[in-house]
Image (cartoon, helix red, strand yellow):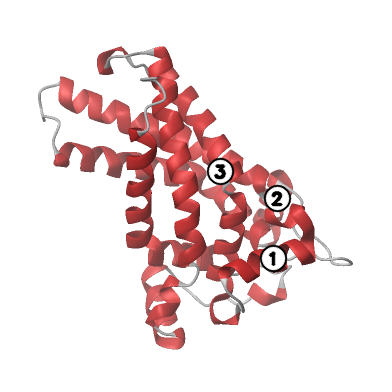
Amino acid sequence: MSVLSWKPFVYGGLASLVAEFGTFPVDLTKTRLQVQGQSIDSRFREIKYRGMFHALFRISREEGILALYSGIAPALLRQASYGTIKIGIYQSLKRLFVNRLEDETLLINVICGVISGVISSALANPTDVLKIRMQAQGSLFQGGMIGSFIDIYQQEGTRGLWRGVVPTAQRAAIVVGVELPVYDITKKHLILSGLMGDTILTHFISSFTCGLAGAIASNPVDVVRTRMMNQRAIVGSVELYRGTVDGLVKVRTTG
């Protein structure tokens, strides 16, 4: 029963919710930057934003401050499920292999991270689809969260709710496979080296390091995932991006 402790699930979910709310405007600018400049999609052909700060300023000026939190409801719902499952499974899997901090290895942490990331991201994919569309389309997006879920299902079927699930799982495998092990290894060496104790500063440095590593490693797949989720495929329409490899090729060749 100690392996299936409820604490990693609850604490992981609460931490994910707080982090999501605090970083959401930055996440929104990331989505806007990722979908713009698509020569094969006229809706997002224009290059409106030159960078994160320019996007934050222009969105707040043209659409209002509240637009920076467009899509926050499905984002919080996603974190309540994704973050809870991801961290809970990761910590539980690690306890199956080792019981002590000093016995953990990079290989064990990577394996546990990848498995927990793939499972949690696949289950939470519908909330990710809606969040991406609300972020990308801003004030042009119509409808509330529940109605939008129903609309996606009616227009695009179950496949629409799980659109982009393969690159999402791939991204999660990369992110979690990099972030959680880097976090644990960084914290482990900081503590065992005697440079720092198990303090808030130690956790902050470990979190900053793992977040940077995960973002750099996953960004190419994240661009493809965002564009796939944002495309609305209904009967008779053409899917612009058919998969990760197809998306990477098209992004590289056509923008």
Label 1 crowd bin: few (<14), some (14–19), many (20+), radius 10 Å:
few
Quarter placement of the N terminus: top left
Name the element at disc 2: helix
Name the element at disc 1: helix
Instruction: Name the mark nearer the viewer: 1 or 2.
Output: 1
Quarter-wise, where is residue 245 in the image?
A: top right
Q: Is residue 233 visible?
A: no
Q: What x and y, as percent, mark residue 81?
A: 49, 47
Give me the residue at 60% from left, 67% from top.
Answer: 146
Q: What x and y, as percent, mark residue 216?
A: 44, 45
Taking the image as shown, residue 99 lies to the left or right of residue 42, namely left
Taking the image as shown, residue 117 lies to the left or right of residue 66, namely right
Q: Are marks 1 and 2 in contact (CB under 8 Å)?
A: no
Q: What x and y, as percent, mark residue 3?
A: 39, 20
Q: Is residue 238 above or below residue 180?
A: below
Instruction: Name the mark nearer the viewer: 2 or 3.
Output: 3
Q: Is residue 176 above or below residue 242?
A: above
Q: Which mark is residue 249?
A: 2
Taking the image as shown, residue 35 lies to the left or right of residue 75, namely right
| Spatial CA span between label 2 and label 3 | 24 Å
Name the element at disc 3: helix
Quarter placement of the C terminus: bottom right
**Residue topped by disc 1:** 150
Residue type marked 2: Val
Residue type marked 1: Ile
Quarter-wise, where is residue 185 in the image?
A: top left
Q: What x and y, as percent, mark residue 111?
A: 49, 23
Q: Which mark is residue 121?
A: 3
Residue type marked 3: Ser
Label 2 crowd bin: few (<14), some (14–19), many (20+), radius 10 Å:
some
